[in-house]
Image (cartoon, rainbow, N blue to C red):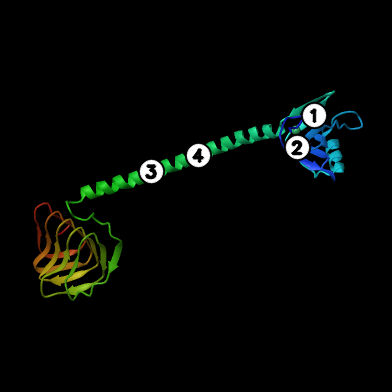
Amino acid sequence: MNCLQCGAYSFEYAGPNKEYARCTKCLALHTVPRPGHVQLMDVRAPNGQVDPQFTAIFAQQLGFAPRQAQDHVVGVGPVNIVVPTARIERDVRNKISGIIWGWIIGGIILAIMAIVGVVIFFFVRAQMKDMSANGGMPAAGTGAPETVTWDGKAPYSCGASQVVTIKGTTATLTAGPAISALGACQLTLDGVNITAPDGIQAMGTAKVTVKGGSIKSTGTAISALGTAQVDVQGAKITGKTSALGAAKITGAK
Ligand SMILES: [Zn+2]
């Protein structure tokens, strides 16, 4: 059987013989004259009005546990109006959560667009860097910068995409170029004094910066091949310098 007030099919029972039934939706109280049959109880407060609080106390007297109505029954004169408060609450909640979800989804979309943008930016930049490097050569200066110690007793060479600084070394060699910069090596000689038959040999796309110090050679002090660049900044160069092809030597006096 259904609730005689709201039509819901949802009863709970009380009383020693389950002679009372309460609709769990609108809390309307019913009597159960015999199993499977209900009759609506007209519960009214002493002032003759339908009062949900009074009905709740009445229900507790009958043995029902306190319960929050999903619908409130409001007595308007002799007519009982079922107000679907639960439905209104739910609709309002849905609307609010819809707005909040709109913000969250909007924020997520913005974040994804930002991440994609950053990824594309770095990807394109990496591609351009690769293209600007000579075919097959590693990108110039992509290695982690490092300061190496060189004892100056044997020739030193760097290559690939190394970024290297040698500081304050005095090297005296009897053979070979003292320094060979190969590949895309970026080498900085800072205050290095070299005495050798040949000083610096730079090849590939290597970039050598000679800051201070000196190179003293009986043969070629600086030799640059390929598209290598050697920039002399205040170092004293004794001996020939030789730049072939697109290679460049700047600042040597
Ligand atoms: Zn009901």
Callout 4 secondary element: helix
Q: Position of residue 176 (x, y in %)?
A: 11, 70
Q: Residue at x 82, y 36 (%)?
A: 34
Position of residue 3 relative to residue 136, above or below, is above
Name the one closer to the observer, 174 or 89: 89
Tell me which amino acid carries mark 3: Val
Tell me which amino acid carries mark 4: Ile
* Residue 105 - label: 4
Tell me which amino acid carries mark 2: Ala
The residue under label 2 is: 69
Between the residue at mark 2 and the residue at mark 3, the CA separation in whole angstroms equals: 50 Å
Q: Earlier in the sequence, mark 2 or mark 3?
A: 2
Nearest to the eye among marks 2 and 3: give it. Answer: 2
The residue under label 3 is: 116
The residue under label 1 is: 74
* Residue 155 - label: none
Work out which residue is located at the far left of the displayed protein and give it. 219
Position of residue 65 relative to residue 139, above or below, is above
> Is residue 194 in sight in this rendering?
yes
